[in-house]
Image (cartoon, helix red, strand yellow):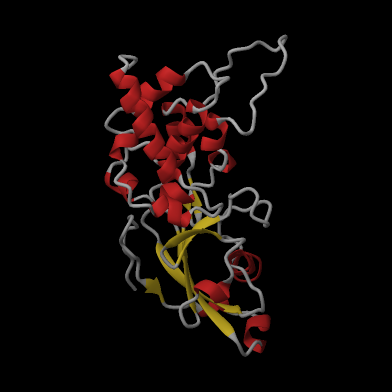
Amino acid sequence: MLCSRRSGRSRAKALPPEPAVIASTETQATTTTLQVDIWRGGATGCLRRYQVPRRDNQTVLDVVTYVQRHLDPTLAYRFACRVGMCGSCAMTVNGVARWTCRTHVSKVMRGARLEIAPLRNLPVIRDLACDMREFFEKWTQARGRFAPTRTRREDFALIPPESRERRAVDAAIECIGCGVCYASCDVVAWNPDYLGPAALNRAWTLANDVRDAGRIERLRAVAGDAGCHACHTHLSCTERCPKKLSPTAGIAGLKRAVALAALKGEL
């Protein structure tokens, strides 16, 4: 039995099935089964194989939940809403970062096989659960916090929905911070200091918020070697975003904004 260290591009060899682990009356009575290899352990763990009953309209999260509830209660993973609202169930499914609650097995399985691993580019706590602190710390580095220009005693600022700035970020503000784009980004894999598409997308939305007072500081934060200019425009983040957003477009907007600010002597 062989195990290999997990990395952004390496794939562990699956352990043979363990009869004591996968034995189940329901599984044995089902004629159609799915062979599932699931990452177990931390960064140096291995894939372990399970046999799961095949169901109609079955999602990948259904598969993981079945394994945890019927075959191996020690399996660690995250989920919350189960309907594509929170993004906490994001995992790597057959090599691609996805929301498992919205991913149907029939759309992604290879033959009758499925491989499920934690998100790439993030430290693994255990099994399918990653440590998201690094991901959100980069939001802080990108000045991803709103800096108000008014106090609570003043009236609300009104932003016309048809304004140029508001329309520029109309889709980008829908990001829920699931980490799929970050796990899919090759630049993050090459350069761990890179802020990543989600943090830069957040910076782009705030850079276009006329109520915000931190625009110049934010542009300075994203103008460095680990900021927007490090993006190679591979479009992986845009291709994989479950909400169909385009962080690549936001990063391109930041590049233009940084260049204009530099020409004006503001940086």
Q: Where 258 falls versus 242 (above or below)?
A: above
Q: Where 178 falls versus 140 (above or below)?
A: below
Q: Is residue 189 visible?
A: yes
- Residue 165 as seen in the image, left or right of residue 230: right
- Residue 182 as seen in the image, left or right of residue 262: right
- Residue 149 as seen in the image, left or right of residue 115: right
Front residue (pair 47, 197): 197
Label tally: 0
Front residue (pair 135, 245): 245
- For the point 54% across and 18% down, the residue is 147
Q: Position of residue 249 (x, y in %)?
A: 42, 43
Q: Position of residue 204 (x, y in %)?
A: 46, 33
Q: Where 95 falls versus 126 (above or below)?
A: below
Q: Is residue 134 visible?
A: no
- For the point 43% across and 36% down, the residue is 200
- For the point 39% across and 54% down, the residue is 236
Image quarter in which the N terminus is found: bottom left
Image quarter in which the C terminus is found: top left
- For the point 67% across and 78% down, the residue is 56
Which corner quadrant of the image does residue 226 belong to? top left
Front residue (pair 26, 9): 9
Q: Position of residue 126 (x, y in %)?
A: 48, 52
Which corner quadrant of the image does residue 61 belong to? bottom right
